[in-house]
Image: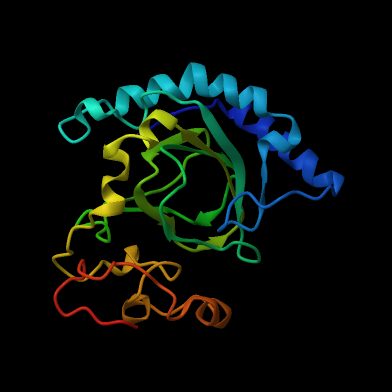
Amino acid sequence: GHLIFFSPQTSKLILDEVDHFYGTGLPSQRVNSMNRYGVILSDIGLEPFITTLQRLVCKPIAQALFRPNATTGDQGHPAADFDSHHAFIVKYRKDQDSHLDIHTDDSDVTFNISLGRAGYVGSNLIFCGMIGSKDHRQHFVSYEHVIGRCVVHLGSRRHGTDNIISGERVNLIIWNHSLCWRESPAASHHQRNYEQEEQPPDPRCVSYTHDRDFGVFKEYPSVEREAEFLGRGWCPPPGAEYPGFKVE
């Protein structure tokens, strides 16, 4: 789902705080294994803000969007209870991180809020299927960010971004974690049982980080990426390939 999350004034206040940190020249640790540019909010004194936001805003919204259903039943659901978070800023520019490869999050429910900057072009979100499902590499929907708006999705949904064409996009990402969900049988089901794909993947949904057949459908974004990831994919697991599957 997507919704208005921050006013323009609040979005600017957070962005100004991040810019102030960058202006100090202080080092920052990497926010995750894929984004090279950004800052973890707990490192700049904003952890209490995120904790309060999680309790008063994120948790009620997530529980309304992801109620128990026939799949999860009494085994819990991803928003049953949030007990920790990892919140960080990501930046996309042509000369830095220009895109984000298709992946899933180390998150049970992810909140992705656009902070700016006005005028950038490209860098739309690409959503694919749920991890482990037969259509996990099929295109679901693409989304164009709007400043102050938030996209809420399960961490187990495959997603990424296309290339930014110009300008700079800055987003606040909140990974919400639920220990009771992670310890439930339903949470680990997809890790043990990958459904067999029925057809080749949509090229928009293949990952050079994870997929064994990426090079069959797309060119690597750079020589460096090809040298790093060619032949190192694991997905789809053996036995879950579509008919006619070829390794790159």
- Across and down, in percent, residue 154 comes to 36, 40
Q: Residue at x 25, y 29 (%)?
A: 75
Q: Nearer the viewer, residue 204 or 42?
A: 42
Asked whether residue 132 appears in the rendered view, the answer is: no
Q: How many marks?
A: 0
Quarter of the N terminus within the rendering: top left
Whether residue 209 sits left or right of residue 71 in the image: it is right
Asked whether residue 162 appears in the rendered view, the answer is: yes
Quarter of the C terminus within the rendering: bottom left
Task: Check the image and tell me how it is coloured.
Answer: rainbow
Q: Is residue 165 above or below residue 182?
A: below
Q: Is residue 36 above or below residue 112?
A: below
- On the image, which quarter does residue 212 sit in? bottom left
- Across and down, in percent, residue 176 comes to 48, 33
Q: Residue at x 32, y 81 (%)?
A: 216
Which residue lies most toward the top here?
56
- Across and down, in percent, residue 78 comes to 35, 32
- Across and down, in percent, residue 195 comes to 18, 58
Q: Residue at x 38, y 53 (%)?
A: 159
Whether residue 200 sits left or right of residue 112 in the image: it is left
Q: Is residue 160 above or below residue 175?
A: below
Q: Residue at x 26, y 25 (%)?
A: 67
